[in-house]
Amino acid sequence: MSNSEEAFAEAKKVIPGGVNSPARAFSAVDNEPIFIEAGKGSKVYDIEDNEYLDYVGSWGPMILGYNHPQIVESLQGQVKKGTSFGAPTQVETELAELIIDAVDSIAKVRMVNSGTEATMSALRLARGYTGRDKIVKLEGCYHGHGDSLLVEAGSGVTTLGISGSSGVPNDIASETIVAPYNDLEALEKIFNKYQDEIAAVILEPVTGNMGVIEPHDEYLENLRKMTADNDILLIFDEVMTGFRLSYGGAQELYEVEPDITTLGKIIGGGLPVGAYGGKKEIMEYVAPEGPVYQAGTLSGNPLAMKAGAETLKLLKQSDVYASLEEKGAYLAEGFRNNIESLGIKAQISRVGSMFSIFFTDTEVVDYQTAQTSNTDVFAAYFNQMLKQGIYLPPSQFEANFISNAHTEDELKATIEANYLALKKVKKLE
Ligand SMILES: *Cc1c(COP(=O)(O)O)cnc(C)c1O
């Protein structure tokens, strides 16, 4: 047994499935997880000191690479002063100011401890502000594991949602209506049927959690208009895309302003964090200013705030996004050439430094089309890449992330590894 296999066997005795978040278990790729000892720049090292070139980036936060020296230093400074007080600290204001400065639609922001907490709180705020109970979510978008958001589509587009997990009461799931992504007609039907009952539409403006899918031209603009016309709030869940696709997130890239935005991942610089923010008149509903209750012992934790503020300052200073776009385009072109020359049924979907390879020749525009992907081929591909020392997210339906630490040589090596892996899996098609 390898050290990781032993470590996994030990972990399984004391942690459900051996992991603290299901996607880490490698079950979608017929393998067992690698236990990580350390990370540096674009690389991670397992407990046997094997080196991997990494495209997981802790599922998004590590946009500057692992263990950035400036972030480590600022954390060390804060540790010496104290790790938590449960009282206001100035670094909370600093991070809030950085976020508000970056994201035009946010006038005030509340810090929480995870993306899940951010979206749960944003829904409560939307319901409190509008006095309405129903929520529209889009199929395949993931917003954390809150009850209202772990909901699957009913049988027809205008029917109410059904519980997507054991333990989520159907009474709660039925307050959520599920519609396909990239489909305005379906939303129009839903708006017509439930118009005065819908508090908000929540979505990932660019999806990452069913693989990377881009919004159709004008989709976000029209969604903005339709929600405003119906007095329905628009919530962009930018936990993944915020500070990833541009400094101002997907909303800056597509020039569409939501009413409420949820953030996480990058704004914690690798520490646990979440945040929700929006227009002043909406955020004034949050306690203690307003009647919507939401609190947290460790919210605004000074360590997380420090790592987040330092990350944002580094992102703001440099030309990170232009460079990430260049790296993303280079990698995608290399992969596309490989796909074409081998004649594999696959496609690359990319926005900036987020990308997915879908093993299907159906154009992927929503959850249903994403599901046409051949997950057996993906699993084989994943394992072939891992054998070559390249660590990818262990599921067809996750986004890969490029960090600013990835070098041109590393990207070139990835394209070569991709060619060999695709060649191996071709016979499985
Ligand atoms: C990761 C993610 C979440 C959940 O955040 P956690 O910190 O894992 O709770 C919510 N929404 C989106 C879009 C995400 O990518």
Image (tube, helix red, strand yellow):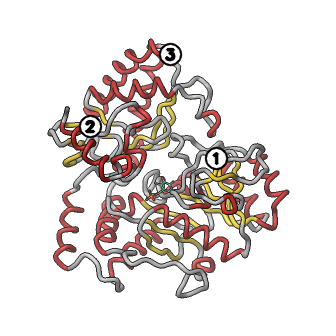
Q: Return the mark for residue 90.
A: none
Under tag 1, what secondary structure?
Answer: loop
Q: Residues within 10 Å of mark 3 (few under 14, many from 20)?
A: few
Q: Is residue 83 above or below residue 336?
A: below
Q: Is residue 221 above or below residue 303?
A: above
Q: Nearer the viewer, residue 62 or 102?
A: 62
Distance of label 3 from label 1 (alpha carbons): 27 Å
Which corner quadrant of the image does residue 70 belong to?
bottom left
Q: Which residue matches tag 2?
A: 53
Q: Return the mark for residue 429.
A: 3
Under tag 2, what secondary structure?
Answer: strand
Q: Is residue 411 above or below residue 155?
A: above
Distance of label 3 from label 2 (alpha carbons): 27 Å
Under tag 3, what secondary structure?
Answer: loop
Please state which amino acid type lies under the numbered disc 1: Glu
- The reply, left or right, for residue 135 in relation to residue 185 is left
